[in-house]
Structures are given as structure tokens and as C-alpha cells.
Image (cartoon, rainbow, N blue to C red):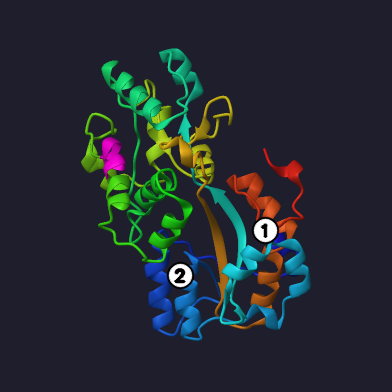
């Protein structure tokens, strides 16, 4: 790995699909990793409240960071004046993936509104096929892929101020606007004719395996809503596929025209639990353009660092 080659520091990597649960258990047991990905800013705040995280501003050049990153990224990684988390990559979530060749063979057109997407789903069913691949299984974090649907629908059916209130628990989950979002999601997710494997399969199919259904012969499904990162799963499972030719995406379409087509985003955050020279070197490396250009090329990520060369994007 480039970091190991440049520094001579050996990295011992432990991966898990149950990161929130595994990391919490390790921290509570007093045996956290030196450095770890953090599932979301909320968990970062919980660890920061317990004084479990190193203040990165004690050794990082904050002037360089403020130049390389927008203030939003810095603010999201800060708790009560302490800079506890860095964002190394980002994803655009408001996307629906499809197989252009399968679409062309069946005569399907990319929808530009929610109603068109439902009409397309109905046409696929009428043709004796299944429109959607949905997988919500993700270990202890199962269900997050479904929350993305609800967030996207909320963004397209309420004012931004209402969405922000919802995020901050300012409106009830029983509010009509939230219930409507679940009802709209249910148009697809609860329709057994719409979903590959039926609605029960959504709970057992892993999110990373779900888009496989688009690339069988014949296709087991034609549509899959997921973020930009899913490109790496698709290419891992089907290395010969060519992005833009064998798989492509379109924006999650508008529902209420007055709210347009907003974009839901996500990002990968890292924090430091043990203050060692090796951990410091690693944290300084992962915020660099050189490191983030690797993730762009190999994982289809977007960079949070403004100095990344745009030419590295596919």
C-alpha cells in the first residue's frame, strides 16, 4: 500500500460490516483501535462526549485543512471546540442504477419523474418481469438502505426547513409528511410484484449483493437505488462490466415539482482513539489529495479534499 511504502509503517486492518456495534463494544471494553472509520457524526459525538477521541488539531495543520476542505466538513468533525473527525471521501446517494443494454433490449426509457418511474415499474411487471432489486441487510446496521429511500422522498415532498426539523426530532415520526414518505416508499418496497425475491427478500439480501440482479441473463431486476459507492461492489462481482455501457444511473426523480431534484449525500469519517506517532502519520496521510485519489479510482468515491485533481474521476 502507498502509505506503508512511503512511511514504513505497517497497517493492521480489521474489516467488518457491523462497524457501529463492533466499534462500540471495543471502546466500551477499553480496547479501541488506534484509528477507525466512524459510521456517522452522531457516533463521533457520542465518543467525543466520553473523551474517547484524540483532538486532531493538536498535531494537524489546521490552516492547510481549512484550505483543502470547506468549512462544513470541518464543522461536522468538530465537537465543543475539539476537532475529532476527518472526512476522507463522499458519496452521492440520490441515484437509481440500471443496465442500459437491458433497458434498450426491452424498450424501456429512463424516467424523469416519480410517476414515470412507477409507470415504468408497472410496465416491467406487465412484461412478466421484476423491476426492483432492494437489499436492506447489513448486519447490525440493517435497514440503513431503507432510511436513504425515506430521506430522498422527504427531500422531494417537503420544504428543506421541515426536513431539517425532522432530522433534529422537531417533528414526530407520526407527522403526516413522514407518513407520506413511508407510504410512497411502500408503493415500491411493499409491492411483491415489484421486488426481486418478494418483499421478504429485502430483509435478507445484503445491500452489496442486491444490484447483482441487474446483471443476470435474463435480468432478475432492472432498477436499483443506491449511492455512488455501489460501483465498487458491481465491479467486484462483475469485473468485465464497463461503467457507462453495462451499468449507469439516473437521478432519483422528483415527486413534487416544487421541490425539484435535491441530492442526498454521505461521507466516510475517520477518528483517532490512541495518540501514537503511527496513528498521527496515518491520519495526516488520509486527508491528503494523494490518498483520496486512490479511493476515487478504485472505489468510485467522491473526494472531500478540494485539491484532488478532477482528472482522476472516471
- Image spot of residue 286 (x, y percent): 67, 64
- Image spot of residue 23 (x, y percent): 43, 72
Look at discs 1 and 2 and give the one toward the viewer. Answer: 2
Q: Secondary structure at mark 1?
A: loop
Vertically, is 25 above or below 150?
Answer: below
**Residue 286 located left or right of residue 128:** right
Q: Are marks 1 and 2 in contact (CB under 8 Å)?
A: no
Q: Which mark is residue 200?
A: none
Image quarter where the C terminus lies is: top right
Between 34 and 44, the one nearer to me in the picture: 44
Q: Residues within 10 Å of mark 1 (few under 14, many from 20)?
A: few
Vertically, is 26 above or below 269?
Answer: below
Q: Secondary structure at mark 2?
A: helix
**Residue 170 located left or right of residue 195:** right
Q: Residue at x 37, y 54 (%)?
A: 144
Q: Residue at x 40, y 75 (%)?
A: 24
Visible residue check, residue 159: yes
Quadrant of residue 57 in the image?
A: bottom right
Quadrant of residue 68 in the image?
A: bottom right
Vertically, is 18 above or below 121?
Answer: below
Q: Main secondary structure of the magenta part?
A: helix
Read off the magenta span. Answer: 183-189
Question: Which residue is label 2 attached to?
Answer: 42
Vertically, is 101 above or below 286?
Answer: above
Q: Is residue 76 magenta?
A: no
Between 234 and 135, the one nearer to me in the picture: 135
Question: Which residue is label 1 attached to?
Answer: 1
Image quarter where the N terminus lies is: bottom right
Between 78 and 309, the one nearer to me in the picture: 78
User: What is the spatial separation of the Cα atoms under label 1 and label 2, in whole angstroms?
Assistant: 30 Å
* Sequence-wise first label, 1 or 2: 1
Amino acid at each position: 500500500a502507498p502509505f506503508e511504502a512511503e512511511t514504513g509503517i505497517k497497517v493492521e486492518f480489521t474489516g467488518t460490516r457491523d462497524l457501529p456495534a463492533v466499534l462500540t463494544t471495543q471502546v466500551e471494553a477499553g480496547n479501541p483501535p488506534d484509528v477507525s472509520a466512524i459510521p456517522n457524526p452522531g457516533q463521533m459525538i457520542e465518543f467525543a462526549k466520553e473523551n474517547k477521541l484524540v483532538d486532531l488539531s493538536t498535531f494537524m495543520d489546521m490552516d492547510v485543512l481549512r484550505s483543502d476542505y470547506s468549512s462544513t466538513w470541518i464543522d461536522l468533525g468538530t465537537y465543543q471546540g475539539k476537532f475529532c473527525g476527518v472526512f476522507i471521501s463522499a458519496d452521492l446517494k440520490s441515484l437509481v442504477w440500471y443496465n442500459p443494454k437491458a433497458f434498450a433490449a426491452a424498450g424501456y426509457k429512463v424516467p424523469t419523474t416519480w410517476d414515470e418511474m412507477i409507470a415504468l415499474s408497472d410496465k416491467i411487471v406487465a412484461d412478466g418481469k421484476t423491476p426492483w432489486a432492494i437489499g436492506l441487510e447489513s448486519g447490525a446496521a440493517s435497514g440503513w438502505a431503507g432510511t436513504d429511500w425515506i430521506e430522498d422522498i422527504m427531500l422531494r415532498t417537503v420544504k428543506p426547513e421541515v426536513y431539517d426539523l425532522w432530522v433534529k426530532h422537531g417533528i414526530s415520526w407520526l407527522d403526516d409528511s413522514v407518513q407520506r414518505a413511508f407510504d410512497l416508499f411502500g408503493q415500491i418496497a411493499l409491492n411483491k410484484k415489484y421486488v426481486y425475491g418478494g418483499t421478504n427478500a429485502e430483509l435478507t439480501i445484503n445491500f452489496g449483493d442486491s444490484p447483482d440482479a441487474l446483471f443476470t441473463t435474463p435480468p432478475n431486476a432492472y432498477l436499483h437505488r443506491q449511492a455512488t459507492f455501489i460501483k465498487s461492489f458491481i465491479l467486484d462481482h462483475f469485473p468485465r462490466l464497463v461503467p457507462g455501457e453495462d451499468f449507469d444511473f439516473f437521478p432519483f426523480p422528483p415527486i413534487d415539482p416544487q421541490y425539484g431534484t435535491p441530492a442526498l449525500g454521505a461521507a466516510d469519517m475517520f477518528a483517532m482513539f490512541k495518540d501514537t506517532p503511527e496513528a498521527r502519520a496515518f491520519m495526516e496521510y488520509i486527508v491528503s489529495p494523494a490518498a483520496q485519489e486512490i479511493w476515487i479510482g478504485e472505489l468510485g468515491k467522491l473526494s472531500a479534499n478540494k485539491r484532488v485533481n478532477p482528472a482522476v474521476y472516471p
